[in-house]
Image (cartoon, rainbow, N blue to C red):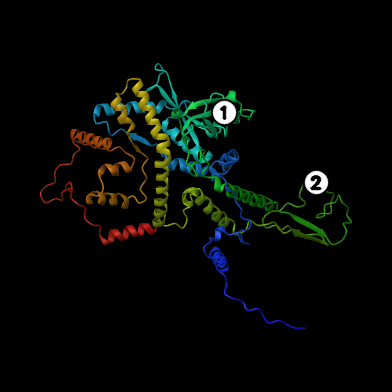
Amino acid sequence: MTTSAPKKRGRPTNAEIEARARGLMNVVSRYEAAGTGRRMAGWNPPSSGPNRAITGLQKIRDRSRDARRNEWAGESFVQKWGTTLIGVGIVPRFTRVKNKDRKQAINDLWKDFVAQSDADGVLNLYGQQTLAVHSWIEAGEVFARERPRGMDAPLAVPMQVQLIEAEYCPLLDADQWNGMPPGNKIRSGIELSKAGRRVAYWFYKEHPGDGLNTTIDPSKLVRVPADQVRHIYFPSRPGALRGVSPLTSILTNLRNVSDYEDAVLERQKLANLFMAFIKWSLPNMAGADTDPLTGLPFGGDAASPLAGMAPGTMQELEPGQEVIFANPPEAGTTYSDYIRTRHLGTASGGGMPYEVFSGDIANVSDRTLRVIMNEFRRFAEQRQWQVVIPMFCQPVVEWFAKAALLKGEVTVEEAGLIKRCEHAPHGWAHIHPVQDPQGKQIELEMGVRSRSSIIGSAGDDPDTVDQERADDKAREDELGLTPPPPEPGQATQKKPGEKNKPLSPQQLLMFEDEDRS
């Protein structure tokens, strides 16, 4: 047997060098999340578009509504977001109307409209704001429709606002439909022009969930022009036509935690069935109808206990008898920690601090809570100024201005000034009742903030506050409540513009002690 010498390999060709370089680049410059190896082989999500991804949207709505009806966590999310974003109401301020009498007349007209705004005749406008937020968080979207009324209607202005649930607008796709202009198309119940602009919405005449027939019947749909409707939702992706509930990513976790709580509850119910078994080491010679403890004929029914048990009882048994007690399961020492850990993730997925969501503020200091609340309030303000105010509050003001102009309550110029109003959300309460106001006072004295901004941050109208101060001063002077000037040598009041004295080290230490407590 002869063996040949190993073939001497020559210099690699350019093609081999390029192939090696491409292979090296594929290994070096690739994201692990884009890999298809053993770790990522089972992760193959679809490449769905923003509107194809909402397939099954109605099932998500149903489960979200069920979580709110039957789970405390679901109700807490919806309730807390309504309270945080709306409070007692987001109020418009018609600051551009300079005439004091006309401004007061417009404010009075607005107040009358607020009381009559609901087309269903149940809530006022600020209650509708809260209901709109609840519906948006629960179902992912809600519609507001302008409902014009006759001039002879007993209303402040001939217009009301109707809130419409998401189910009224079907997930309908059609290139041709009865009553739709040629060239337009319907996508997810929204009629689009050739340029992709929203021109109309298609709504059921009645809620589809209140009837037996859920098929889409053209005779049961009505076309509403887009300028009479506002679609309140936050698109999860660019180009998304419909909204998905912010609770979608945590619904599975809510369900699993609820099932776990039910299982523990049932286990504890079983543990309450305290049982004892009498075991005979010899056959029962007395017979089946004889009480094994007394030897006398058994007088009770089948459900009666053999022996009543009371605290401190010492029961003597017959020879050959033995008592074996049941060993029921326990709830587990990690139950509370597990529930809290799961709800920490639930609260984070819902965009809310765990302490606000659950009311559990154990082991949280004042300073830590301040950091948490400041971050949460920034997120809440984002939702206020990017969703609630531009999609609901501002359109309602514009509808109000148009209706007031039609009725002759305002002029054309005043209607334009009304539309340019400033919206004032409900102000945040002070986290620290002493330090927070003092911080604002320091900002005012430094000249980096105005009185109007400080008053406005509390949700109040600066003009109203100043007028109230003037009225209080006049009333005090009239009743002789104004304090007399100080006598020579006595302490005087702080003059306007005079700065406060800096806090002493003892006062600073006192505030730090309050924070730690």
Residue 164 visible in the snapshot: yes
Quarter of the image that includes the N terminus: bottom right
Residue hosting label 1: 176
Where residue 91 sits, quadrant-wise, is top left
Quarter of the image that includes the C terminus: bottom left
Residue at 32% across / 20% down in the picture? 408
Q: Nearer the viewer, mark 2 or mark 1?
A: 1
- 297 or 410: which is nearer to us? 410
- 412 or 313: which is nearer to us? 412
Residue at 59% across / 76% down in the picture? 10
Q: Amino acid at mark 1?
A: Gln
Is 315 left or right of 454, judged from the image as shown?
right
- From this view, report whether residue 459 is shown above or below residue 207: below
Mark closest to the chain's N terminus, 2 or 1: 1
Q: Amino acid at mark 2?
A: Ala
- From this view, report whether residue 312 is shown above or below residue 112: below
Where residue 419 sits, quadrant-wise, is top left
Give the structural element (helix, strand or loop) at label 2: loop
- 236 or 494: which is nearer to us? 236
Q: Are marks 2 and 1 in contact (CB under 8 Å)?
A: no
Disc number placed over residue 430 in the picture, else none? none
Residue 189 visible in the snapshot: no
Residue 14 x, y percent position in the rendering: 55, 68
Residue 300 x, y percent position in the rendering: 80, 46
Disc number placed over residue 302 in the picture, else none? 2
Where residue 400 sits, quadrant-wise, is top left
Label 1 neighbour load within 10 Å: few <14, some 14-19, many 20+: few
